[in-house]
Image (tube, rainbow, N blue to C red):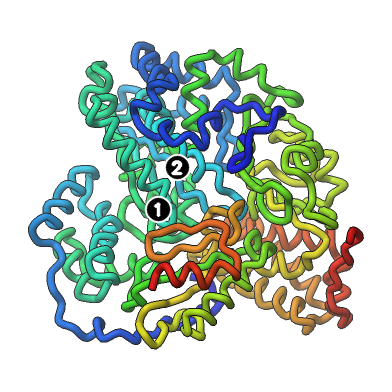
Amino acid sequence: MGGVESPDYASHDRAAHEPYVAVFTGDVKRELDELLTRYPTKMAALLPALWIVQRERGWVSDEGMAEVAGFLDLTPAYVKGVVTFYTMYHQHPVGKYFIQVCTTSPCGICGAEDVVKAFLRHTNAGELGITSPDGKFTVIEVECLGACGFATPVMVNEEFIESVTPDKVPELLARLA
Amino acid sequence: MGFPHHPHPRETTVLTRHFGEADARTLAGWKKRGGYKALEKALGMQPADIVNVVKESGLRGRGGAGFPTGMKWSFMKPGDGKPHYLCCNADESEPGTFKDRELMRWTPHALVEGCAIAAYAIGAETAYVYIRGEFTEPLHWMESAVKEAYAAGIIGKNAMGSGKRIDVHVHKGAGAYICGEETALMESLEGRRGNPRIKPPFPAVSGVFGMPTTINNVETLIAAAPILLNGAEWYKKMSLSSPKSTGTKLYSVCGNVQRPGTYEVVMGFPFKEFLYDLCGGPLHGRKFKAVIPGGASVPIQNMEEAEATLMDYEGFVAGGSMLGSGGVIVIDDAQPMVTVIARLARFFAHESCGQCTQCREGTAWTTKILERIRDGEGTVEDLDTLLDIGEQMTGKTICVLSDSCAVPVVSGIKKFRGEFEALIQGKRFHPVTAAVA
């Protein structure tokens, strides 16, 4: 992508070193088979298939990419090329709660930076992209979440939370923990 | 309606009238509100007649470019022996824009209906709704609406008993602003990196999977249903200014304003009254300083320009900007413009796909220079350098992301030069002190 440096999302999770268990078996394989009927090419099922891997495993490992490649007649290198283009596939294990705070200008002028600081402080993550010592929280800044009228929007895993202010952060985290 | 606020009496709610009504999201609730009557009518018409009604209505693309919708549909040649595709662009990612999000989370069946009508009109059996991955709630409601519509036989191999096959599939994106660019969306849908394609060939000739494709924005497709039901004349009459801009338009309003939210007004509505009356004006003790009226990619307006603007495609151009996506970002006198613009540039640098040198390098250097000016480390040459880079980034790349990054920078320097120069001269930005206690 562009030439502006991004934080290095280091891995602090043992899951990265655990043996790989195949994702596409049983019902999940049937889900993939149904997906393939929607498109004229197998390759078109790549993004949905990667979403399934992330849903089942929490992140997309090299082994996960290779498994998807096998089912879709692609090479693992090709799949990796696609995975690395998109921001939402985790290429490392992340905390139990992956917290994305929108800080693009519309939220920025409504105080999003203070929301980020509140999350970093109250989760003990300390730094953007680094998982908290208890393995629970990873906080990142994200580009426009498309809910600018509800500043500041925050995503916690799949949950979308509107109008977050710094004073609401402790309560929100207490609900998660 | 001014969602999440009550509708303002001066709004004209056609697409937004059922926002906030939870049961409008279900098939039963949607049918109770007259849902799928337009599709039923459409399936009894000749496709060419549908295209003509939409052409006659004057409907133009609501995603940003404003291309006449009926004309776009007419590029799809019937009987060419190839499968045709419809893509719905629901990858709404333009900073300041969240109208499609509200349309999908409150009226998902309206989009299923709009997709089915358009697919039938262009001779497509398959429609893909490409929704950005972060829109978990709209995704949920769209998937639920599609499932209900299949189960009721509204879409599928025999849509509403017409003998026509219309499939609608929801496709989840994975985090990339550039996939809102139409050809990047198609690349992404095919399972590739979202790199925009060189045009021509245009999508109507070779689109997704190399086949003739029409791609429309969510709001555009949803507008087709009431046009078919009420007629082109009804739609054309909703215009207060230019006859080239017809119907209603959704605006998503955000930033430093009393009542942010989604509003629907007739084309040509006065922008000043929109900002001060419908949206409630500035925050307590503050004054508006600038507006970005059509998402981050359009020129910044100062208040003199904004307050003289009539809200339609031609009106925003006359007011020194563009209608764009209708994402209105309001900036007040407490905000340093350089910070606002630098953050926008960082957005574009992050989202550049990196194919074209002018964009990959230009967005990154623009960001670095703006951030050093913001931090009080700018030099007197920096403004000329930025303007020069801006020129090199405009009209020279495969898609317009590069141009989009240059636009707020160049218009910002032109209209708020004093703020840049003050920072370069070592003065800190002092927000205008609140006048009211």
Foreground: B19 or B389? B19
Which of the image's four quarters has the N terminus of chain B?
top right
What is the crowding at mark 2: few (fewer than 14 residues within 10 Å), some, or many (at least 20)? many
In the visual, does B435 lie left or right of A71? right
The residue under the point 45% across, 34% down is B107
Residue under disc 2 on the same chain as residue under disc 1: yes
Residue B239 placement (x, y as % from top left): 70, 23
Which amino acid does the dot numbered 2 rest on?
Arg
Callout count: 2
Residue drawn at 38 percent across, 65 percent down: A157
Q: Residue at x 51, y 30 (%)?
A: B18
User: Which residue is label 1 attached to?
Assistant: B136
Circle 2: element type: helix
Q: Say which quadrant the C terminus of chain B sits in.
A: bottom right
| Residue A61 screen position, x and y as percent | 25, 75
Does residue B62 appear in the picture of this structure? yes
Please report, as a chain letter, where disc 1 is located. B
Pinpoint residue B235: horizontal percent, then vertical percent. 60, 19
